[in-house]
Image (tube, rainbow, N blue to C red):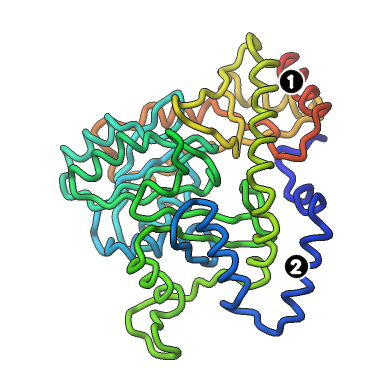
């Protein structure tokens, strides 16, 4: 069976270097917020071209802390999307804020600026905008940034699936007031456990985030503000420093696999992913659309090809959220349509050319 994703393959590719980093860190005797975290934060910030990165426990916490650090809290409205991992909406509510759900563009699956503008008209008290760079595709940041600035709203980028993606030559994560990355094992840059990181160009915000992630401490054992416990582990930071060195190469391989899929699946009766003009997609997922998505998924499995659905139920239709979230005036028709049709094919840098050809043949036969 060709897996849909394979984080173990990434570990095996760098096994000697990762094992050495783990041994070095274990021997150091320092296991929480030490040199490994500081080193990873500096390297990741440099990778983005920003001065500050703050490691935290996971991607959800990154969103929560970014919202809190920017003063978004109890009762404040945050515009975001429903075609996303539920963590995006979970984070908004954990910060005490209120999600306002915006529909997506059916081609790129990212926040539709016209729908966002309609939401600002209906809810002029929206305090923050939280677009998701879904599947590795940058959202329409120029348009979204203009709208956020016009309405005095903070812009927080959810970059959980877009490490290294670019738009108009500018790396995602550098457009907003803050940017949040998950480091979950299957991400383009993934730890061997949980992890997250927040990036910003604002030194004061970075300082606030470092306090918030550790009980609000600016002085040891003294809480200056109300914080939480959300620290990136030293061991994961050591692993991430190794894996960061391969990220550009791995993203290039993902684009090569996507190009092979594009060529091999042309005319196969499924809709292929498009790339936004001016964007450098990093293909966290290669998501096709099919009218008989569930049938295709079953037939691929019969032919030895695993696939996945990102995401089968929009957040607003899930039992925990149904009938209690604010939906923008443009509705969520495209979000609901995508949830019925999208299917993610195998996508990870270590996927062989032979496996790619097998996937193409299986889809065409389906």
Q: Is residue 170 above or below residue 263?
A: below
Toward the top, the furthest residue is 267
Q: Nearer the viewer, residue 27 or 134?
A: 27
Residue in the picture at 64% in, 31% down: 255
Q: Is residue 37 left or right of residue 211?
A: right
Give x and y (percent) for residue 332.
35, 32
Tell me the SS state at disc 2: helix
- Graded by Cα atoms within 10 Å as few (under 14), some (14 to 19) or many (20 or more), the crowding at tag 2 reads many
In this view, the mark in front (1 or 2)? 2
Name which quarter of the figure residue 67 lies in: bottom left
Residue in the picture at 74% in, 45% down: 6
Q: Which corner quadrant holds the C terminus?
A: top right
Q: Is residue 221 above or below residue 271?
A: below
Q: Nearer the viewer, residue 94 or 172?
A: 172
Give x and y (percent) for residue 286.
61, 31
Give x and y (percent) for residue 304.
81, 30
Name which quarter of the figure residue 253 lies in: top right
Give x and y (percent) for residue 12.
82, 52
Q: Is residue 210 left or right of residue 352?
A: left
Tell me the SS state at disc 1: helix
Q: Which residue is mark 1?
A: 360
Q: Nearer the viewer, residue 294 or 219?
A: 219
Marks 1 and 2 sit apart, C-alpha to C-alpha, by: 38 Å
């Amino acid at each position: 069976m060709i897996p849909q994703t394979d984080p173990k393959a990434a570990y095996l590719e760098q096994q000697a270097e990762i094992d050495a980093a783990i041994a070095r860190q274990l021997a150091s005797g320092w296991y929480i917020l030490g040199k490994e975290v500081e080193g990873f934060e500096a390297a990741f910030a440099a990778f983005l071209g920003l001065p500050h990165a703050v490691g935290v426990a996971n991607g959800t916490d990154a969103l929560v802390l970014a919202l809190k650090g920017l003063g978004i809290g109890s009762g404040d409205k945050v515009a975001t999307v429903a075609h996303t991992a539920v963590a995006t909406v979970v984070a908004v509510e954990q910060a005490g804020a209120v999600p306002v759900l915006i529909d997506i563009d059916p081609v790129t699956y990212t926040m539709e600026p016209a729908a966002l503008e309609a939401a600002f008209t209906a809810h002029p008290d929206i305090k923050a905008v939280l677009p998701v760079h879904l599947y590795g595709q940058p959202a329409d940041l120029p348009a979204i940034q203009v709208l956020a600035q016009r309405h005095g709203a903070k812009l927080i980028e959810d970059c959980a699936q877009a490490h290294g993606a670019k738009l108009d030559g500018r790396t995602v994560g550098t457009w907003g007031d803050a940017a949040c990355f998950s480091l979950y094992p299957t991400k383009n840059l993934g730890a061997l456990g949980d992890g997250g990181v927040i990036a910003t160009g604002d030194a004061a915000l970075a300082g606030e985030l470092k306090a918030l992630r550790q009980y609000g401490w600016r002085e040891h054992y003294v809480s200056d503000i109300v914080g939480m416990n959300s620290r990136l582990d030293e061991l994961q930071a050591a692993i991430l420093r190794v894996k960061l060195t391969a990220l550009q190469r791995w993203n290039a391989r993902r684009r090569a696999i996507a190009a092979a899929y594009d060529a091999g699946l042309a005319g196969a009766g499924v809709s292929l992913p498009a790339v936004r003009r001016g964007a450098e997609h990093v293909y966290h997922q290669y998501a096709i659309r099919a009218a008989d998505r569930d049938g295709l998924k079953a037939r691929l499995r019969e032919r030895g090809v695993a696939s996945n659905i990102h995401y089968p139920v929009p957040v607003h239709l899930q039992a925990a959220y149904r009938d209690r979230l604010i939906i923008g005036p443009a509705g969520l028709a495209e979000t609901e349509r995508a949830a019925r049709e999208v299917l993610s094919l195998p996508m990870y840098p270590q996927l062989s050319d032979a496996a790619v050809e097998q996937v193409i043949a299986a889809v065409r036969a389906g």
